[in-house]
Amino acid sequence: MKRNAISGGWYLIRIKSGWDRKVEEFLRYAGLISYLPAVSLPKSDGTIHMKPLFPGYAFIFMESDGPDWAKILDLPGILSWLSFDGVIPSIPETVIESIREKVKDLSGKSEFWSRLKRGELVQVVTGKIEVIAEVFEDAKSPDSPVILLMEFMGRMVRASVPWYMIAGVYDETKAPRNLRRRRRTRGRGRLVRY
């Protein structure tokens, strides 16, 4: 496998599931800088646990005069380098900084998922796309998605969205007319058609 022509940068490796902390220790012991992004999430018993943002992957910073790339694969828990057509691409520092900012943001709202209520308008952010949606069914746990109603091609459709893609509760007065709070039936809470 050929590595990228640019030396000295961040690269991605595949690791065994559940080995995040062990691999981090092995890499540190080998004198390498690694980054395994994780978000703090509350458990049902009130304690906090760290959940990997990219399970099964770790970022490694490799210097141009660093250790032999093949020897890193000999470390326990490491499966392979992430490569495309035999080339190991480098990851720009700006991407790593963006991930660090996202982790900080997600950890800051670790209990946000439990505060979403049916009928609330929220702002969904995926990359550069921002959409207003209505909570149809709240998340039961940090691992389960939130079911939202979103406008798609002129129709309201259900969408299953991870809670961490929800930026916050949206100001209802600024919402599009079709997403303003609508009346629901008393029984099952279905939307009333106009």
Image: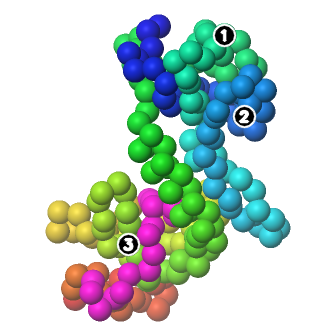
Q: Secondary structure at mark 3?
A: strand
Front residue of 92/153: it is 92
Residue 42 is tagged as: none
Residue type, label 3: Gln
Question: Can see residue 128?
Answer: yes
Which residue is depicted at the point 78% across and 26% down?
Answer: 29
Residue type, label 1: Lys
Q: Is residue 96 above or below residue 59?
A: below
**How far from the left and from the top, in percent, is residue 144?**
58, 59
Residue 123 is tagged as: 3
- In this view, the residue farthest toward the left is 154
135 left or right, relative to 16 = left
* Mark 1, other Cα within 10 Å: few <14 / some 14–19 / many ≥20: few
Residue type, label 2: Glu
**How far from the left and from the top, in percent, is residue 68?**
61, 10
Give the image's coloring scheme. Answer: rainbow
Question: From which residue to which does the magenta span run?
Answer: 160-175
Q: Is residue 36 above or below residue 86?
A: below
Query: Which residue matches tag 1?
Result: 71
3 left or right, relative to 193 = right
Foreground label between 2 and 3: 2
Was residue 146 drawn as part of the magenta stretch in this picture?
no
Q: Secondary structure at mark 1?
A: helix
For the residues marked 1 and 2, what is the alpha-carbon distance in whole angstroms? 16 Å
Which residue is depicted at the point 49% across and 24% down?
Answer: 8
For the residues marked 2 and 3, what is the alpha-carbon distance in whole angstroms? 35 Å
